[in-house]
Amino acid sequence: MSINTIILPKTTKFIHEGYVTCKSPKYVKNMVYKIAKFFRREFQYDFTQFHLDEKAMDYKAYLFTDYKAYHSISGETGIEVIGACCFRYGKRYADVSERWFLQWIWLHPYFRNTGRLKEIWSKFINDFGNNFLPEPPLSHAMQGFLSKYGTDEQRYCLECPKTATAPKAATSRARQ
Ligand SMILES: CC(C)(COP(=O)(O)OP(=O)(O)OC[C@H]1O[C@@H](n2cnc3c(N)ncnc32)[C@H](O)[C@@H]1OP(=O)(O)O)[C@@H](O)C(=O)NCCC(=O)NCCS
């Protein structure tokens, strides 16, 4: 994926600081969707793991926004969304009990390794429990992150065979 083709979502509208749910306004869900598509493109998955018309009550998505408001040529100011992630609740694996899973997360390459995930991780643990698990396959970056900042249970998942490294080539994930 060429970095030049990544056009981040921007808005001049208000974005609520909380989680995005199926009840959130469509323009907010659309921003999550756009980021989910970048995640799919980078890891060459078969399908986008977020949809605007999902009715499920079991997801909570989060938008990472740029601190600085952007200024458009026409003089408008607003917020740039630089990444997103989506949590889903359930029993997603036969051998793992029901809980929240961090299904996917993606930050624009310019904003990676700038501490954005580190600064929000304790809030995620607070909101989703210290047993929430990032859903495999895990990227090298996520493995590195968990080995340093994950809870015991999250670090344990690094040793499970199912958490094999996210492949570079196209792959399939089981459809939910
Ligand atoms: C994974 C991701 C969300 C991490 O978010 P981030 O905001 O860049 O991470 P932070 O800057 O808060 O944390 C950095 C820590 O993560 C780890 N890390 C980040 N990138 C890494 C890499 N490429 N290799 C190894 N460890 C890495 C390090 O432990 C680092 O800790 P340090 O700063 O103390 O050295 C982000 O890199 C990303 O969007 N990557 C592409 C998508 C992706 O991999 N999603 C996960 C799918 S399972």
Image (cartoon, rainbow, N blue to C red):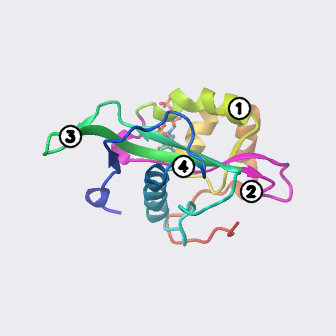
Q: Is residue 141 left or right of residue 5?
A: right
Mark-to-mark CA distance, 2 and 3: 49 Å
Mark-to-mark CA distance, 3 and 4: 38 Å
Mark-to-mark CA distance, 4 and 1: 17 Å
The residue type indicated by label 3 comes to: Glu
Q: Dot 3: what SS?
A: loop
Q: Is residue 56 left or right of residue 170?
A: right
Q: Dot 2: what SS?
A: helix
| Numbered mark located on residue 140 in the image | 4
- Point out residue 9 in the picture as x, y percentages from the top left corner: 35, 51
| Numbered mark located on residue 161 in the image | 2
Q: Is label 4 within 8 A of ligand 1 (CB to nearest ligand atom)?
A: yes
Looking at the image, tell me whether mark 2 or mark 1 is earlier in sequence order.
1
- Point out residue 104 in the picture as x, y percentages from the top left corner: 58, 52
Q: Is residue 76 left or right of residue 19?
A: left
Looking at the image, tell me whether mark 2 or mark 3 is earlier in sequence order.
3
The residue type indicated by label 4 comes to: His
Taking the spot 70% from the left edge, 36% from the top edge, the residue there is 128
- Highlighted range, magenta: 89-113
Q: Where does label 3 land, which residue? A: 76
Mark-to-mark CA distance, 1 and 3: 42 Å
Q: Is label 2 within 8 A of ligand 1 (CB to nearest ligand atom)?
A: no
Taking the spot 50% from the left edge, 70% from the top edge, the residue there is 169
Q: Where does label 1 land, which residue? A: 151
Disc 2 crowd rating (10 Å Cα; few below 14, some 14-19, many 20+) is: few
The residue type indicated by label 2 comes to: Pro
